Image: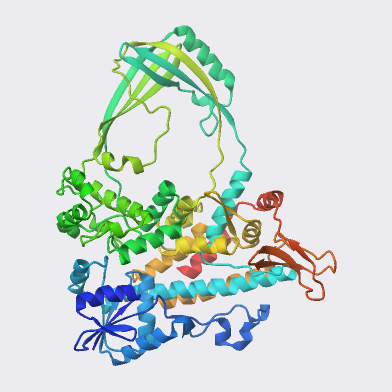
Amino acid sequence: MKLFLCEKPSQGNDIGKVLGATKRGDGCLATPDGQIIVTWGVGHLVEQFNPEDYDPALKQWTFETLPIIPSQWKLAPKKETKKQYNVVMGLLKKANAVIIATDIDREGETIARELLDLANFRGKIQRLWLSALDDASIRKALGQLKSNQETLPLYYAGLARSRADWLVGINFSRLFTLLAKQKGYQGVLSVGRVQTPTLAMVVQRDLDIANFVSKNHYILLVQLANQAGQFMAQYQIPDNHCDEDGLCLNSAVIQQANQAIRQAGSAKVLSVETKREKESPPLLFSLSSLQTTCNRLFGFGAQQVLDIAQSLYETHKATTYPRTDCGYLPESQLAEVPKVIQALATADPQLKPIVSKLDSSLKSRAWNDKKISAHHGIIPTFGRVDISKMNDSELKVYQLVRLHYLAQFLPPCETDKTVATFESGGHSLIAHGNVMVKPGWKSLLGKTLEENTDETKQGLPPLNVNQQCKVVDTEVKSLQTQPPKPYNEGTLLSAMKNAARFVTDPRLKQQLRETEGLGTEATRAPTIEGLFKRGYLVKKGKNINASAEGVALVNSLPTVLKDPGLTALWEQALNQIAEGTLSLDDFMAKQSQFIRYLMKQCMEQGMQIGNIEVRKCPECGKPMRKIKHEKGTFWGCTGYPQCQHKEADKTTKSKQGSSRKQGTRNVSVSDQLKQLRQHLN
């Protein structure tokens, strides 16, 4: 019997329909002859043992039991899906061949293979690599099954991720909770391999904003004119009058230039240079770029976009696999372009005027085999799609996906960019011109792009060298530098994806691939949601800020647990396992060494937990603890029921501000970097 093992029931139904497995059984589908059976998980059917499952003594949180490092990792069936677990395990015992048909990422691979390992399955294993769930894509993938060894490293990467997260979360959450308890804090401090550096980025951004000192600076705008029209130029301030940021802080310099230019009354053209620039269409969407764009355009949250993208993929069969980190397409898919375009026009007749302008023979930069990771960019499928069944949010996201695909078959946007220099009253001026000659793909996507509000964006009239232009008016502008903006969900996702850019240590920067980030496309949104639920992050409108408790936690932790760049090095190691260049055993051995080293260091040095809010009961003097209730959060005495004093939870802005100011930017991470590199490489 051949068994197809899917990730969820909807996936099983789609694949079963193509296979002819329509006979419904208990937690499975079968062909009439019973030779092919399709079954599924409900995501992960098993989970890591809790510490107390290894040893009942570990249920008690004590310093003496740390660090907790299992000698043999074990899994237990999830209670809520135990019935389906038993179904799958029973079918695995009967099967002589298994085709893994879960999602095509390391989590999907882990969901299937952890069951195969638990069942001690020794039959033939193959991999169904599905990028879309429409019938045509399923049939194509069934004809191109991958071998067992081809995707096995993804499983090892999934195990490494799960075990590393367990080690960091269990050990350091217990350690810092125990240390805080010594100071009177009664809550639980949650530490995570990805969540903690994500929180640290928000804490640092809040600190940068709170400590920002604005600088007054000055510019001079000069309105010029010739016979063909008026335009704006800007005074080029000499370097010796600018600070290290290129800003002029001395208004007298600007006023003197202004007076000289007004007295001159004209400006002589010194040079004119025009270049025709061609801009290619943007790449296809990865999940992160889709989430960021939807947050900017529609205000959608990261998890909301992931749910919508998953629905477009699973329910509507309208788009390809969404949890991708890639915006490119394999060149082999060029052959499918006419079918995709035709399917889009059939599903939505309003697209026909656009389709008539497309050139399907164009090959944009998005088609590049060398840039393909495990998955390609999100694109429309060529299956039959009923857009009337999509809700408004789904339709908005689908519209973005299909327009970005169609834009690949429009010509580049062509713009004439002109730079002209002038001399007036012994001072230099410069004017920039920007004229779109051929809109190309921007005629389709222009409204979804960031608008350029730069005041210098203008068209210039024809200019000739040595021509005199009249000075019509001048304006001295006093400006102020602005603090960085608070994170929102879109910009925080982008920061997580590009964590390597936060690295300042030159040795790590050389070692860390620029593409490495915090977490994966699939886990970033849940990580942010988890920080909100734990109360470490708060949302004010679209802005995301760290709570006082989140700030205190970050300020209490060692750099290596919260530095985004260092944590990205962990993610790089996981990717190396998926690529087959690093073994699971080597990774876990070094992880265990590293956990022991850092745990010992923290215990010996003693971490400063004093920033964490500790309240004493005014009636009995015992510590107060924060209690979350369905009606809100309040503080109650730990001496309850003998002492029943309680207080409202009032976190003042001044307290948050003082907590932020206590934080300091990490200046040197050389010692921790040395240890991390030693234990990860």
Residue 8 in view in this figure: yes
Residue 609 in the image: state x and y as whole percent: 70, 63
Asked if residue 259 lies left or right of residue 431, the reply is right
Q: Residue at x 47, y 64 (%)?
A: 526
Residue 58 in the image: state x and y as whole percent: 62, 83
* Rendering quarter of residue 553: bottom right
The relative height of residue 254 versus residue 679 in the rendered view (above or below) is above
The relative height of residue 339 versus residue 141 in the rendered view (above or below) is above
Q: Residue at x 23, y 53 (%)?
A: 367
In front of the other: 357 or 203:
357
Q: Residue furthest front?
A: 388
**For the image shown, how many numbered marks are present on the structure?**
0
Q: Residue at x 79, y 76 (%)?
A: 641
* Rendering quarter of residue 302: bottom left
Residue 122 in the image: state x and y as whole percent: 30, 89
Q: How is the image coloured?
A: rainbow
Q: Residue furthest right?
A: 619
Asked if residue 52 lies left or right of residue 404, the reply is right
Residue 269 in the image: state x and y as whole percent: 35, 15
Q: Residue at x 79, y 71 (%)?
A: 644
Query: The N terminus lies in which quarter of the figure?
Result: bottom left
In front of the other: 372 or 136:
136
In front of the other: 137 or 396:
396
Q: Residue furthest bottom?
A: 94
Query: The C terminus lies in which quarter of the figure?
Result: bottom left
